[in-house]
Each structure stands twice: as C-alpha cells, then as structure tokens.
Image: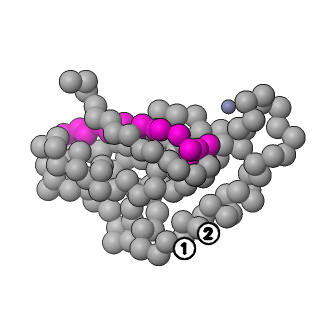
Amino acid sequence: MSGYYSFGVKTDLHTAMIDITRKVQDIVKESGIENGICIVYIPHTTAAVTVNENADPDVVKDFMMEINKLVPLSDGYRHSEGNSAAHIKASMIGFSETLIVENGRLVLGTWQGIYFMEFDGPRIRKVYVKVLKG
Ligand code: ZN
C-alpha cells in the first residue's frame, strides 16, 4: 500500500460542510499508531478542510452564509471555468489540518470536529490522511 490512507466523500450540494471526524479517527485506529501526528490533506482546488464546532448544526449554516457573502458566487471573475469563488474559498480555508494523536485517538477539543468543505459540488472527492509516529 502507499504511505498514506485515503477515503472518498460524496457531496450532494454546491457548498457543504461534512463532518469527517469519525472516518479520520477510524484511519488513526487502523494505522495502529498510538502517539504521533495525523495530517488530513485535501487534493482538490475547490474543496478544503477545517476544524470547528460539531455540536450545533447552526454553526455550519452560519459559516456557509458568511463565507458566501465574503466571496460571492459571481463577481465579474475572469476564470473561464466559472468557479473562481470556489477556488478562493478553498485557499482561504486551507487544504490541510495537523492533529495530535494520543493513545490511539485524535486529540480534539470537546466541541471540535474535522470538516470537509465542499465549494464546487456536487462531486466525488478524496481525503488523504497520513499518520506519523512520534
Ligand atoms: Zn476552476
């Protein structure tokens, strides 16, 4: 196998924030690494990853409402593919997160979850995960 894990994410909407915490945790468990670092990487130019609250679903709605105001879907962009807003939002949020692994589990705050951010769906996406001992 390659030196990293990957899994698919299917998005049904144009923009979406999907909790992938469980899938990443399952990979950490599968890796057998008890203590180290987990890197979550998104190999796309119009999707991203972030860590945020996974308790109140309204946080996700508010997040999407505001980021769509910051970077409107159409604004006289030049990029011919028509998805400049998605490219910009993806870079604003970022393509990777680094998490601590302790005792075989991700170290996250009580209310934190890992979110896949879709900005140009619906699409079939990939998430790469690398777990390092240390
Ligand atoms: Zn494009």
Q: Is residue 131 above or below residue 117?
A: above
Q: Is residue 90 visible?
A: no
The image's colouring method is: one colour
As displayed, is residue 97 above or below residue 59?
A: above
Q: Is mark 1 within 8 Å of ligand 1?
A: no
Q: How many numbered marks, from 0 up?
A: 2
Taking the view exactly as shown, the residue that stands out farthest to the top is 2
Secondary structure, mark 1, is: helix
User: Label 1 sits on what residue type?
Assistant: Asp
Residue visible at 38% across and 40% down in the picture: 8
- Residue with the mark numbered 2: 62
Mark 1 and mark 2: Cα distance apart in space: 6 Å
Q: Is residue 54 left or right of residue 102?
A: right
Decide which of 107, 71 is in the foreground and name it.
71
Q: Which residue is mark 1?
A: 58
Q: Residue at x 22, y 50 (%)?
A: 26
Examine the structure image and report whether residue 97 is included in the region drawn in magenta: no
Where does ligand 1 appear, by image quarter?
top right
Res. 105 visible in picture: yes
Magenta region, residue range: 118-134
Q: Nearer the viewer, residue 108 or 90?
A: 90
Q: Tell me residue 34's x, y (percent).
A: 13, 49
Q: Is residue 129 magenta?
A: yes
Q: Report whether the residue tagged 2 is closer than 8 Å to ligand 1.
A: no
Residue 131: x, y in percent? Answer: 25, 40
**Tags 1 and 2 touching, CB below 8 Å:** yes
- At a point 39% along the width and 61% down the height, the residue shown is 113
Q: Amino acid at mark 2?
A: Asp
